[in-house]
Amino acid sequence: KAGVTQTPRYLIKTRGQQVTLSCSPISGHRSVSWYQQTPGQGLQFLFEYFSETQRNKGNFPGRFSGRQFSNSRSEMNVSTLELGDSALYLCASSSPGGAGTEAFFGQGTRLTVV
Amino acid sequence: SQQGEEDPQALSIQEGENATMNCSYKTSINNLQWYRQNSGRGLVHLILIRSNEREKHSGRLRVTLDTSKKSSSLLITASRAADTASYFCAKGAAGNKLTFGGGTRVLVKP
């Protein structure tokens, strides 16, 4: 079974631009969550999508948004990039129905904002 | 903000020794999960322990949970150089939202 795939792996953007990150979950997994990891704030939950609906949302500004497609693939978008958005963005998928099950993480997208 | 506090923040041991790290949390849990991360890469799930469980084992890993003290510990026995990584506890809540602690960086010296 293929794991969680995130693309791209690395990205460099300029302040003010926007960026879209992609995540393909494990086949059959309908829950996809996104996390931001920075040295200062650690791992922080962004949002979770389940069956194309946002089920949970973390405490991030509206510049951070996401969506999920009918094949469970998910994208997250960050608009008007700031230097502080530089981080490792991790996507995780969980099994069907998954309340309180283990999460399988992708390798992440490292975003650098200059 | 993070739900849990992990202790210690960093740990350096010799190969073959045991490593113990602790995690405290503030509010009630559905489950507590432990993950490993190597060098800023993706996280790997280690163990999930539910709120009605007290101890779980997986290979050289042992996790305990004390809900009265709102704390959990992860023990790695007979450590190997390959165990060098950061270890995170995460509180599982509604849906699949995970709230992570700050992590413990473990260095296993050969």
Image (cartoon, rainbow, N blue to C red):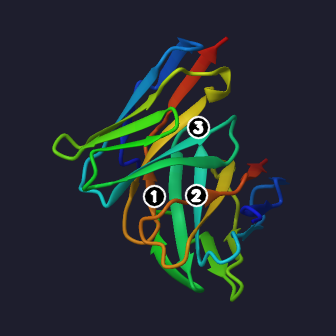
Marks 1, 2 in one chain: no
Task: Look at discs 1 and 2 and give the one toward the viewer.
Answer: 1
Give me the residue at 70% from left, 65% from top: A80
Percent of width and height locating residue A96? 54, 77
Give the CA distance from mark 3 to mark 1. Answer: 18 Å
Task: Relative to B95, say whether B55 is above or below.
Answer: above
Which residue ends up furthest to the left in the rendered image?
A: B68
Percent of width and height locating residue A44? 51, 53
Please name whichever residue, B87 or B79, is drawn nearer the observer in this view of the structure: B79
Q: Give, as a three-letter code, the residue at label 3.
A: Pro
Please name whichever residue, A73 or A112, is drawn nearer the observer in this view of the structure: A73
Quadrant placement of the C terminus of chain B = top right
Q: Which residue is mark 2?
A: A35
Task: Look at discs 3 and 2 and give the one toward the viewer.
Answer: 2
Disc 3, SS: loop
Place residue B108 in its image quadrant: top right
Give the CA distance from mark 1 to mark 2. Answer: 9 Å
